[in-house]
């Protein structure tokens, strides 16, 4: 792994990255674009995971030399910013708003979840950085507009959006991990038997009560909706 592939690299100045035309930062113009590089990196992350995305692999995908790629993205941090903003362009930043901030914020949360499930590498990526590209800012603008009726100032609305995004990212990470664990039914059955034995030992009355309570829908959609409703409905608009 070269230094440019290390996640600790700091990337480039946002003004240079987002406000400059789509052209290499130095050298001769190659036969590919920043859009093509980014799309190739996203496809690689979607199919093989974010660890598969290296400058060398992406260069091979677009048929370029690694050194040519560095003129567009000098390190992996910059490439990740480009990837995040690229896929954020899939989100409907101009979707109509109802004027009910709870309804609209829940809609934003569902959009984010669907988006992150399509790109399972996103939750970890958004947790570790703040991407300021045009698509990201357009969706942020949409979310802030959805929150305008809440009565909070701009800074507080930014905090609410950050809280929502962190919740969705964390939930999707858990959801993906649970889906992977479900592929091992023997393990799930063993855990069920273990919890039943622990609940029956008389030393865990709270757990026993929780396990004996009437079940709620446990589909991924129902579980996410339940948690999202608790988060949004519990926000203090004062």
Image: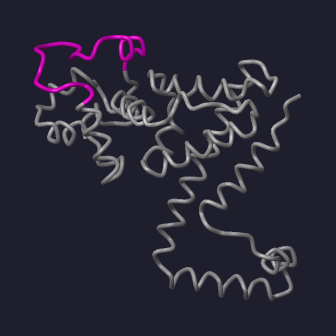
Does the magenta stretch mainly form a helix, a strand or a loop? loop
Query: Is residue 29 in the magenta section?
Result: yes
**Measured from the top left, where is residue 138 in percent x and y?**
52, 23
Q: Which residues are the magenta region?
A: 12-35
Query: Is residue 129 in the magenta section?
Result: no
Q: Is residue 144 left or right of residue 91?
A: right
**Measured from the top left, where is residue 227 in percent x and y?**
71, 54
Q: Is residue 207 left or right of residue 168?
A: right
**Quarter placement of the N terminus:** top left
Q: Residue at x 39, y 16 (%)?
A: 18
Q: Quadrant for residue 101, please give it.
A: top right
**Measured from the top left, where is residue 200 in percent x and y?**
80, 88
Q: Quadrant for residue 87, please give it.
A: top left
Q: Is residue 44 left or right of residue 30?
A: right
Q: Quadrant for residue 143, please give it.
A: top right
**Measured from the top left, where is residue 156 in percent x and y?**
75, 24
**Quarter placement of the C terminus:** top right
């Amino acid at each position: 792994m070269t230094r440019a592939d290390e996640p600790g690299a700091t990337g480039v100045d946002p003004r240079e990255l987002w406000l400059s035309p789509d052209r290499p930062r130095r050298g001769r113009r190659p036969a590919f674009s920043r859009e093509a590089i980014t799309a190739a990196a996203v496809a690689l992350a979607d199919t093989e995971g974010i660890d598969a995305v290296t400058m060398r692999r992406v260069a091979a995908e677009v048929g370029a030399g690694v050194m040519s790629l560095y003129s567009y993205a000098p390190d992996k941090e910059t490439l990740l910013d480009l990837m995040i903003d690229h896929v954020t362009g899939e989100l409907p930043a101009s979707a109509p708003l109802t004027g009910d901030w709870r309804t609209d914020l829940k809609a934003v949360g569902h959009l984010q979840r669907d988006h992150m499930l399509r790109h399972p590498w996103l939750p970890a990526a958004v947790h570790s950085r703040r991407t300021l590209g045009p698509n990201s800012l357009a969706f942020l603008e949409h979310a802030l507009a959805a929150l305008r009726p809440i009565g909070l100032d701009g800074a507080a609305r930014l905090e609410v959006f950050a809280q929502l995004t962190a919740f969705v990212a964390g939930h999707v990470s858990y959801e993906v991990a649970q889906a992977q664990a479900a592929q091992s039914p023997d393990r799930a059955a063993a855990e069920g038997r273990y919890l039943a034995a622990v609940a029956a030992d008389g030393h865990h009355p709270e757990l026993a009560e929780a396990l004996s309570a009437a079940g709620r829908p446990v589909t991924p959609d129902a579980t996410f909706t339940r948690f999202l409703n608790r988060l949004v409905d519990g926000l203090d608009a004062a």
